[in-house]
Image (cartoon, grey):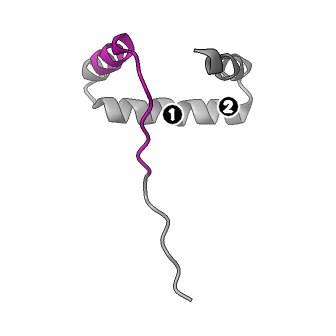
């Protein structure tokens, strides 16, 4: 049986308020990276923090369902 390779990446889209898109783009530009790369950094950092049990981030995730 032939194995099918897992995709190297998955594209995800989320709704974002205009002010948040502007902030993301401005912060990425200031850092000299793309908004996509900055988003990847945020995701990687937050996943690592959640895995460590960061209570502040866990609280933010739980309360973000209502945002």
Q: Do the residues labelled 1 and 2 touch (CB within 8 Å)?
A: no
Q: Mark 2 points at which residue?
A: 50
> Which residue is drawn at the image coordinates 48% and 29% (left, top)?
42
> Which residue is drawn at the image coordinates 45% and 61% (left, top)?
7
The answer to whether 58 is drawn above or below residue 40 in the figure is above
The answer to whether 11 is drawn above or below residue 24 in the figure is below
Mark earlier in primary sequence (1, 2): 1
State the CA–CA distance, disc 1 to disc 2: 10 Å
Mark 2 residue crowding within 10 angstroms, few (<14) / some (14–19) / many (20+): some
Q: Whole-percent x and y of residue 41?
A: 45, 33
Residue found farthest to the bottom? 1
Quarter of the image where one finds residue 23: top left
- State the SS at label 2: helix
> Which residue is drawn at the image coordinates 34% and 14% (left, top)?
18
- State the SS at label 1: helix
> Which residue is drawn at the image coordinates 28% and 16% (left, top)?
26
Q: Nearer the viewer, residue 10 or 35?
A: 10
Q: In which quarter of the image is the C terminus?
A: top right
Quarter of the image where one finds residue 65: top right
Q: Whole-percent x and y of residue 2?
A: 52, 85
The answer to whether 24 is drawn above or below residue 7 in the figure is above
In the rendered structure, the answer to whether residue 27 lies left or right of residue 55 reads left
What span is colored magenta in the figure?
Answer: 10-27
Q: Whole-percent x and y of residue 22?
A: 30, 14
Q: Quadrant of the N terminus?
A: bottom right
Q: Mark 1 points at which residue?
A: 43
In the rendered structure, the answer to whether residue 60 lies left or right of residue 28 reads right
Residue 12 within the magenta-colored segment of the rendering: yes
Q: Which of 10 and 49 is in front in this view?
A: 10
């Amino acid at each position: 049986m032939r194995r099918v390779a897992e995709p190297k990446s998955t594209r995800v889209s989320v709704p974002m308020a205009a002010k948040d898109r502007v902030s993301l783009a401005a912060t990425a530009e200031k850092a000299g990276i793309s908004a996509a790369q900055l988003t990847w950094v945020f995701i990687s950092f937050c996943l690592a923090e959640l895995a460590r049990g960061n209570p502040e981030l866990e609280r933010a995730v739980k309360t973000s369902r209502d945002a």
